[in-house]
Image (cartoon, rainbow, N blue to C red):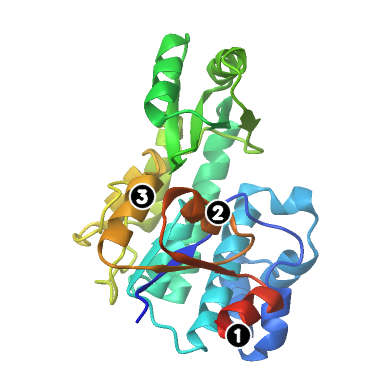
Amino acid sequence: MNKTCLLFSGQGSQYQGMGKEILSLFPDLEFIYTRGSEILGFDLKTTCFEASAEDLAKTEISQPAIFATALLCYEAVKKLGITPDAVAGHSLGEYAAMVAAGILSLEDGFQVIKARAKAMGDCAKGQDGAMCAVLGLSAEEIAAVCESVEGYVIPVNFNSPAQTVIAGEREAVDKAIEKFTEMGKRTMKLAVSAAFHSKLMQSGADAFYDAIKDVAFHEPTVPFYSNVTGAQLTDFSDMPTYLKTHLVSPVQFVKELNAIQETGVDRFIECGPNKVLAGLVKKTLTDVTIFNVENEKTFSKLKGE
């Protein structure tokens, strides 16, 4: 019998039309867009289906749009009778995972995402930060290069043994890229407006905490894994502080995946647009089955498993 972990997509995975095919399969799931639109103050369904790539890339739009799409795909997976033995998300994806685990209600999830997107967007306007994926080097080697350049740049997303993302001041990130290029290593600058998961996000994290400190968080109904520790989260007594820390802490996704597999999980299903996390699982773990659900084709593949 499979033990299953549901994974929830992170920022950067958005695309025009995401979720459209899943909603056409299950029109009863429209409530996700309806509730989201009421809370956000804009038409979430039209935004997901019709907004330009440029608009969808804006933090204030991409975060709630990906969150909604991830939950739509999760509800579709539930219709197959699949109940998770664990949940996890990558950065933004932790919020959809929290709703799936019962830590947040759908409505509070949208309220929290709205506050997070605003705080991060405002913080991005006041900094000159950048992020870049580095391929084919160990996290230790990448950290050593970051330490060797002038200015602030650190590894922030430990995505797979072959991919780590760095973030920091734009000039320092560019200097690190030069060094990686000299070493013959591939880098990919990310299309983001700030140095997420670094200390440059501190003012955003503080504003975010103030906005969510009175939100009701609950004990999870299923094991929930943390980007911050790379392990199962067991203390839910002060989630606003945890989420404030989450904004300025590295994403320990490799540790997290290994910790989940150690519990006997052998099937991972990514819920949400694109299949970035499914790809990271493939690069990190062996002896597991991997699915993603984002459209009719991927849903049918899981259904016919």
**Nearer the observer, disc 3 or disc 2?**
2
Please give the residue where the numbered disc 2 appears in the rendered image. 279
Please tell me the numbered disc located at residue 29.
1
Residue marked by disc 3: 227
Q: Residue 201, can we see it?
A: yes
- Residue 148 lies, in percent from the top left, at 43, 10
Secondary element at image label 3: loop
Residue in the image at 68% along x and 72% along y: 19
Task: Give the distance between the C-alpha atoms of the residues marked 1 and 3, in whole angstroms.
Answer: 28 Å
**Which quadrant of the rendered structure holds the N terminus?**
bottom left
Label 3, label 2: how far apart the Cα atoms are: 17 Å
Viewed as shown, does residue 60 lie left or right of 265? right
The residue type indicated by label 3 comes to Asn
Across and down, in percent, residue 244 comes to 35, 46
- Disc 2 vs disc 1: which is toward the camera? 2
| In the image, residue 271 above or below residue 9 | below
Q: Which three-letter amino acid code belongs to the residue tagged 1?
A: Leu
Q: Residue at x 41, y 74 (%)?
A: 100
Earlier in the chain: of badge 1 and badge 3, it is: 1
